[in-house]
């Protein structure tokens, strides 16, 4: 009795399974897991713009927003993998371990984890953008336009990604103006308009007349607009939030990569990769330059953008010294990706210490 | 929790109609006391359906994806239990405080600090195996939670501070301590300076109950807390003291109860429960420390405690109800593209309707019939 019951149950399960597989094999379905709300106008917003590009290319997509990096992430991932999605993009660092764990259980589903380094299974790829290239452009503009020679920088967390951004920004600014100092305020958040605004005000009080940010809200550019100073947008083109203050923004442009990877799944050509794309591949985009930027700076920046794209100029070209004056990169050399990935020291010209 | 509502005006308004009369009860109704949570859930479902309808979704389908689909299989049910475990554990602890008029709002901080202490111990043993590791790790979490809860308790008893403010502010302190530790001294040396610790060794992890599911032995901690708290509430002198203090602090004083000892004790129990919930998360499904170990379980558990009427058995049911709002929000977004934040709307509505229907505890509605 029991055996027949179990047998019929199993066979119906098998039937159901083959049926579902047959049903989804026709068209590829992509899923996206977001850390914040799609309306944050920063990190998550840009990933969702990328998702819409995938939709526009003719593929079905699903997303789940506001997924905490706690134990909940794993459940959401498993549910997406279990409900007919062929490729899942997990768009925050904290999803790294859950992504690899769930990937093990679903070898036929492809997983793409943003900004992580673990690819424990053949169906896990990682991707990130060379935002520091964009920051080289911002640093050049800031160094050319500051009058107080104090540039403010609101940072999120002391991790290599952020330190690298501060360094590339400072190096570029020093190149055009050796007297500048970069002052850092650590907000210890990726997205908190209140805290970010406080940080911006603190920097303005210390004499900063241009503020860069490595946090995602539009609070900082809005404070800059009110205070009559300049700022740079982060992740998306923030010009509309502070038309006078925003000189330009570094946009995260995930669309082309997402479309590429989903197509690869559809064609059966998807393979494990570690992608780190910059301006050249279009993953990092510089928004339109504001009219407040003088013509000579504009020309310099346009040329720099081309040279960064072609690889003629590297953001970290020696000689580079750290705060104590020790040589980090020798003259004529450029920093390799290994050094960039683990960068945890400030270059000369950055004020303060990295919080430990 | 028992509050007197000034409702004279409302009474007059109804009186004029003479159809319905609202009469004050001599005593709060015991049946209503346990019925109002059910009523609150029902009203939440109705309003939820209405909201879905206004947003342009089919209300019944949406409710089905919210409350039935997530637990339709074994895996979903195990996830429900996994989610309910910390909520139940914390709410049991909080009910000790709330029953005795101590407003501990900082369970989230006690959870975080418990997780920090037990995580620290687990990291000490990261490359070791042994049966003795897990008990030490669990004990450390309970002690961590107790230590952290003792701060508002001692400040309240000896310095007359407001425990609501102190316990709430300490939540943010604990999160900053955790941030500092995972970014700095405790960060994984092989982790490229990302804000997370090493993975704990298997000996520091709570055993899984079923292979392939995430439900872990932490559920026994929650069940033990339910049984023990029931015993304390209804069978001990401490439980009686708490009850009297809850009804009237003056009576408690008159009866000669030494309030200070009891206050500190309920805070310690509450902190231990929250700390254990933190241990359950980091040694259960997470397996390491990082910045987000709890999606505000400590705050959501306040809803659970009240929805469960500060009754251990009620809290079990309440934790399951609230847990499903989390799972349902995910399912509804995946399958129907309903914004995930509706889950929080549901949690808010449950508490709102519960507090509103508490009106029925003190007043009854009499139908007189129309005067034709």
Image: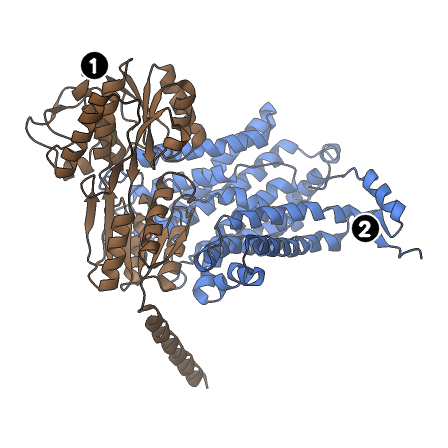
Q: Residue at x 69, y 43 (%)?
A: B243
Q: Position of residue A146 (x, y in %)?
A: 27, 17
Q: Residue at x 88, y 48 (%)?
A: B17
Q: Residue at x 46, y 46 (%)?
A: B276
Q: Colour of chain A?
A: brown
Q: Position of residue B41 (x, y in %)?
A: 63, 55
Q: Residue furthest left?
A: A332
The answer to whether residue A346 is seen in the rendering is no
Q: Secondary structure at mark 2?
A: strand
Q: A285 or B242: which is nearer to us? A: A285
**Residue that carries the numbered disc 2 in the rendered image:** B364
User: Seen in the image, is B248 located left or right of residue B182?
Assistant: right
Question: Which chain is rendered blue in the image?
Answer: B
Badge 2 crowding class, 10 Å Cα cut-off, few under 14, some 14 to 19, many 20 or more, is: some
- Quarter-wise, where is residue A122 in the image? bottom left
Where residue A179 is drawn, which disc sits there?
1
């Amino acid at each position: 009795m029991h055996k027949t019951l179990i047998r019929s149950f199993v066979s119906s399960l098998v039937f159901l399974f083959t049926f579902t597989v047959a049903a989804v094999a026709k068209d590829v379905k992509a899923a996206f897991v977001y850390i914040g709300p799609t309306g944050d106008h920063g990190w998550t917003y840009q990933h969702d713009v990328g998702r819409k590009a995938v939709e526009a290319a003719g593929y079905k997509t699903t997303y789940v927003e506001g997924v905490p990096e706690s134990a909940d992430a794993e459940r959401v991932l498993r549910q997406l993998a279990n409900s007919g999605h062929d490729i899942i993009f997990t768009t925050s660092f904290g999803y790294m371990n859950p992504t690899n764990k769930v990937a093990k259980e679903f070898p036929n589903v492809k997983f793409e984890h943003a900004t992580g380094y673990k690819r424990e299974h053949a169906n896990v790829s990682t991707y990130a953008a060379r935002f520091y290239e964009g920051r080289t452009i911002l640093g050049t503009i800031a160094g050319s336009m500051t009058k107080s020679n104090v540039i403010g920088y609101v940072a999120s967390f002391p991790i290599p990604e952020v330190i690298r951004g501060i360094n590339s920004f400072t190096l570029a600014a020093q190149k055009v103006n050796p007297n500048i100092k970069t002052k850092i305020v650590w907000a210890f958040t990726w997205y908190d308009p209140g805290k970010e605004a406080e940080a911006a005000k603190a920097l303005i009080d210390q004499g900063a007349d241009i503020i860069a940010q490595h946090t995602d809200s539009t609070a900082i550019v809005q404070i800059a607009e009110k205070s009559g100073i300049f700022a740079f947008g982060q992740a998306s083109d923030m010009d509309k939030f502070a038309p006078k203050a925003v000189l330009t923004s570094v946009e995260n442009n995930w669309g082309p990569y997402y479309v590429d990877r989903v197509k690869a799944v559809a064609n059966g050509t998807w393979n494990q990769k570690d992608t780190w794309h910059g301006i050249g591949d279009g993953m990092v985009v510089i928004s339109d330059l504001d009219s407040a930027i003088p013509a000579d700076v504009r020309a310099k920046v346009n040329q720099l953008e081309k040279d960064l794209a072609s690889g003629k100029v590297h953001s970290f070209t020696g000689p580079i010294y750290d705060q104590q004056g020790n040589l980090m990169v020798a003259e004529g050399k450029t920093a390799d990706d290994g050094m960039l990935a683990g960068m945890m020291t400030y270059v000369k010209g950055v004020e303060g210490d990295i919080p430990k | 929790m028992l509050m007197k509502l000034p409702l004279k005006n409302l009474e007059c308004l109804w009186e004029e109609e003479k159809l319905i009369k609202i009469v004050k009860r001599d005593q709060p109704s015991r049946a209503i006391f346990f019925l109002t949570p059910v009523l609150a859930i029902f009203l939440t479902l109705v309003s939820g359906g209405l909201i879905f309808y206004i947003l342009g979704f089919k209300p019944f389908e949406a409710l089905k994806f919210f409350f039935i689909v997530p637990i339709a299989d074994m895996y979903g049910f195990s996830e429900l239990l996994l989610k309910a475990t910390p909520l139940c554990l914390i709410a049991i602890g909080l009910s000790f405080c709330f029953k005795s008029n101590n407003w501990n709002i900082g369970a989230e901080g006690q959870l975080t600090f418990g997780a920090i202490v037990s995580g620290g111990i687990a990291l000490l043993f990261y490359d070791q195996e042994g049966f003795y590791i897990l008990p030490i790790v669990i004990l450390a979490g309970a002690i961590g939670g107790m230590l952290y809860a003792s701060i508002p308790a001692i400040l309240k008893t000896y310095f007359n501070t407001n425990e609501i403010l102190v316990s709430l502010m300490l939540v943010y302190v604990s999160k900053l301590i955790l941030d500092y530790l995972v970014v700095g001294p405790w960060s994984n040396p092989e982790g490229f300076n990302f804000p997370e610790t090493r993975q704990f060794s298997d000996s520091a992890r709570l055993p899984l109950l079923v292979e392939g599911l995430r439900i872990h032995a932490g559920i026994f901690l929650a069940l033990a807390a339910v049984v023990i708290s029931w015993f304390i509430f209804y069978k001990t002198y401490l439980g009686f003291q708490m009850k009297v203090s809850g009804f009237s602090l003056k009576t408690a004083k008159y009866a000669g109860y030494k309030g200070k000892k009891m206050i500190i004790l309920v805070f310690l129990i509450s902190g231990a429960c929250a700390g254990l919930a933190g241990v359950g998360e980091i040694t259960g499904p997470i397996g390491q420390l990082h910045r987000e170990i709890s999606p505000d379980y400590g705050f959501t558990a306040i809803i659970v405690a009240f929805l469960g009427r500060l009754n251990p058995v009620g809290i079990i049911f309440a934790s399951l109800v609230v847990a499903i709002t989390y799972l349902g929000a995910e399912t509804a977004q995946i399958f129907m593209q309903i914004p995930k934040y509706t889950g929080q709307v549901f949690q808010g509505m449950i508490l709102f309707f519960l507090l509103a229907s508490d009106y029925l505890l003190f007043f009854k509605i009499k139908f007189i019939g129309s005067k034709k």
